[in-house]
Amino acid sequence: MSELEAVVSEDACWRQIKMTCDTTDKKLEEAFTYFCMEIQPKLQPYADLLNKKLVNCSFTKELDQSLYHTYLRSVQKSIDLFREQNIPIQAELSVLQQQYGAIAGKMTIQVNGTEYTLQQAAKFLESSDRELRKEVYTKIQERRKQDATAMHELYSNLIGKRHQIAVNTGFENYRDYKFKELGRFDYTKEDCFQFHEAVKQHVVPLVNNIYDHKRVQLGLDILKPWDTEAEPAGTIPLKPFTDGKDLYEKSVKCFEDLHPFFADCLRKMNELQHFDLESRKGKAPGGYNCPLAESGAPFIFMNAAGQMSDVTTMVHEGGHAVHSFLAHPLPLSAFKEYPMEIAEVASMAMELFSMDHWGAFFDNEADLKRAKLHQLERTITIFPWIAIIDKFQHWVYEHPHHSIEERTASWMSILNEFSTSAIDYEGLDQYREIGWQRQLHLFEVPFYYIEYGIAQLGAIGLWMQYKQNPEKALQHYMNALSLGGTKTLPELYAAAGLSFDLSPAYIKQLMDFVKTEMEQL
C-alpha cells in the first residue's frame, strides 16, 4: 500500500509541477485535471477499504505503538471522514482551486514600457523614487481589481462546495471538518483565538516600532503602503544575485557553511534538474518545495526576480527540501507525511540559521547587516497578516452563506483590528477590501496558514538555541525532521528542544528576544 501511495503521489506531483511551470500549455492543465477527475476519485474507495482492512486486522494491535501511533490515528481519521458522496465534490474542488493560479498567472503590468509579472514588478517598490513606487503600487492594485469579481466568484464557489463536504460528513461547518482532516489533534480553535490575541498584544506594538523607524529613516511625515519596502535616497536596493543559476550557486555555498549535508541536498536536486527558480510570464505565482515520495529528491519552484525576498524564499524552500531528504529513509510513505506545523519549522528555522552565512550573497558587512535586519523585520511583520488570514477563514466558514458585501465588511473589520497605526491607508480602501485575494492559501489550501505562525514561534525558539550552541541546535533540528510524522506534534517539538506553546506569555518571551537581536543590528 505504501509503495502504491508513493508512486501515485509522485505522478500527481509531476502533473502539478509541470502545470505550474507553464500555465499557458493546455495539455499540462488537462493532464492534471484528468488526475483530479478520473484517477483520484477511483482510488479513494479502495484506499478506504484498505484502511478498514488495516484497522480491523488482528495483528495491527501488535504493532509498535511508539512508531505506528500517529499513523494509525491518521488512518482512523480517514475512515471517519470518508463519504462516497464527497468524492465528486473533492474532485471538482481540486480542479477549481487551480483556477486561482490561472487567473493570477495572467496578471502583468507595464512599467516604463516594459511588461512585468506582479512578482517582478514588486522590485520597483524598493526604489528610492517615491513617485515610481506609488505608480507601481497603484498599477499592481488596479490590475488585481480587474479580476476582483472573478476572484470573489471563485471563492464563493469554493466555500459552497467545501461547506457541502462538511455537512455530508456530519459537521456543522467546514472549519470543524478541516481541523479534523488536517489532523489537528494537538490544538483547538480556541488555541488559534489565543494566538490571535497574543499577536494583537505583543506583536502589533513591535510592528508599529518597525514602521515608525522606517518612516524616520525615509524622512517622511507619513508612511504609505508603497513606502514599506523602500530604502532611503542614496541607498541602492540589495542585489544578492543576478539570475537563477547564481541564486542556486550562492545558496549551495551558504548551506555548505551551515552544514555540508544541507548543501548536498541542493546539489542532488540540481543534478536531477529539480529547480525552476526564475519568474516569467505564464508561470504560476508563488513558490513551493514539492516532495517526491517515490524517488526521494524534492522539486523547488519559485519566482525569483533578483530581490532579497527571493533569497529568503530559496533558503525557506531549501529547509523544506532538507526535511524531505531527512524523512525519506522512513519505511512507510505515510511516515513521511508530517504535520505542517513542523514542516514550516524546517523552512523558517533555516531562514534564521542561514543568516550568519549570507556572506555567500553579500560581499560587504553593511549589506549583510541590512539583509539580516530585513529578515528579522519580516519575521515580525508577517505575524499580524497570519492572524488576519486565519481569523478571516474562521469567520468565512462559520458563516458559509454570507454575501460578498458581508465578506468585505468582515474582512475590513479583521484587517483594521491588526493593522499597524504607523502606515497611512487613507483613500486606499478600494484596494484594501480585496487584499485577501492575493493570498493563494485561501483558494488552494484552506485553513493552512496559522501553521506559519505556530512554526515561526518554533523557528525563533530554535534560533535562540542556535545563538547559544549552533551544533546542538542543528542536531535538535535534524533529529526532529528525521522523525517525519511518526510522533505527535508536541513530541516533534520536544525532539527539537522546543515547547509547543501558543500562550501570550511564551510569545512575548520570543518577541523580546527578536527585539533584542534587532537592536544589536
Image (cartoon, rainbow, N blue to C red):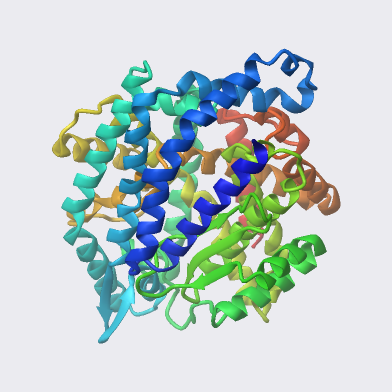
Q: Residue at x 32, y 32 (%)?
A: 162
Residue 286 in the image, given as x and y percentages of width and height = 44, 60
Regarding residue 429, the answer to whether it shows in the image is no
Q: In the rendered image of this protein, does residue 505 appear above or below residue 139?
A: above
Seen in the image, is 439 located left or right of residue 81?
left
Residue 273 in the image, given as x and y percentages of width and height = 62, 71
Total residue callouts: 0
Seen in the image, is 3 located left or right of residue 236?
right
Q: Which quadrant of the rendered structure holds the C terminus?
A: bottom right
Dividing the picture into quadrants, the one containing residue 341 is: top right
Q: Which quadrant of the rendered structure holds the N terminus?
A: top right
Seen in the image, is 154 located left or right of residue 478?
left
Between 151 and 102, the residue placed more toward the observer is 102
Between 461 and 155, the residue placed more toward the observer is 155
Q: Residue at x 51, y 30 (%)?
A: 46
Q: Residue at x 54, y 22 (%)?
A: 77
Regarding residue 157, the answer to whether it shows in the image is yes
Dividing the picture into quadrants, the one containing residue 156 is: top left
Dividing the picture into quadrants, the one containing residue 105 is: bottom left
Between 285 and 496, the residue placed more toward the observer is 285
Between 95 and 167, the residue placed more toward the observer is 95
Q: Residue at x 75, y 32 (%)?
A: 494
Residue 30 in the image, given as x and y percentages of width and height = 35, 58
Residue 92 in the image, given as x and y percentages of width and height = 31, 41
Q: Furthest residue to the bottom?
A: 113
